[in-house]
Image (cartoon, helix red, strand yellow):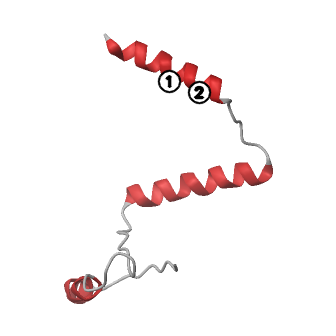
Amino acid sequence: MQTIHLRVNDKIFKNLMWFLGRFNKEEIQLIMGNNEFLSIQEYLIKELEKIETGTSEFISIDQLENELENTIQKYEG
């Protein structure tokens, strides 16, 4: 699947959204270019770069389970 970014004039935005809405989710997925999406995308790109360069830090399953258990206990009451 390909991704494109469009800057659309307000005059045709409603018509374009209507047209795109005629396709099913397997054909077109609408991704609104809001700040949340862009910040998540930037974060994921940086994380991928860390993995590719070997600078990422990983934890074991046991460490993850301990962290989750500690977090659950902290908020249980």
Residue 71 vertical position relative to residue 49 in the rendered view, above or below: above
**Amino acid, disc 1:** Leu
Q: Are marks 2 and 1 in contact (CB under 8 Å)?
A: yes
Q: Which disc number belongs to residue 59?
A: none
Q: x and y percent of residue 65 in the render? A: 56, 24
Q: Determine crowd level at label 1: few under 14, some 14-19, many 20+ residues with C-alpha closer than 10 A.
A: few
Q: Helix, strand or loop at disc 2? A: helix
Residue drawn 38% across the image and 70% down it = 31
Q: Residue at x 39, y 58 (%)?
A: 35
* Image location (x, y in percent) of residue 9: 29, 86
x and y percentages locating residue 67 in the rendered image: 54, 22
Relative image position of residue 48 (x, y in whole percent): 66, 54
| Pointer 1 residue | 68
Which residue is rendered at x = 77% and y = 43% of the image?
55
Q: Which quarter of the rendered picture does the C terminus lie within? A: top left
Q: How many marks?
A: 2
Q: Is residue 58 above or below residue 37?
A: above
Q: Is residue 18 above or below residue 69?
A: below
**Residue closer to the observer: 50 or 1:** 1
Res. 12 image quadrant: bottom left
Residue farthest toward the right in the current orientation of the protein:
54
Kindly identify the residue that appears in the image at 37 percent across and 74 percent down: 29
Q: Is residue 57 left or right of residue 44?
A: right
- Looking at this rendering, what residue extends furthest in the top direction? 77
Within 10 angstroms of label 2, few (less than 14), some, or many (20 or more) residues?
A: few
Q: Which residue is mark 2?
A: 64
Amino acid type indicated by mark 2: Leu
Image-based side of 74 in relation to 56, left or right: left
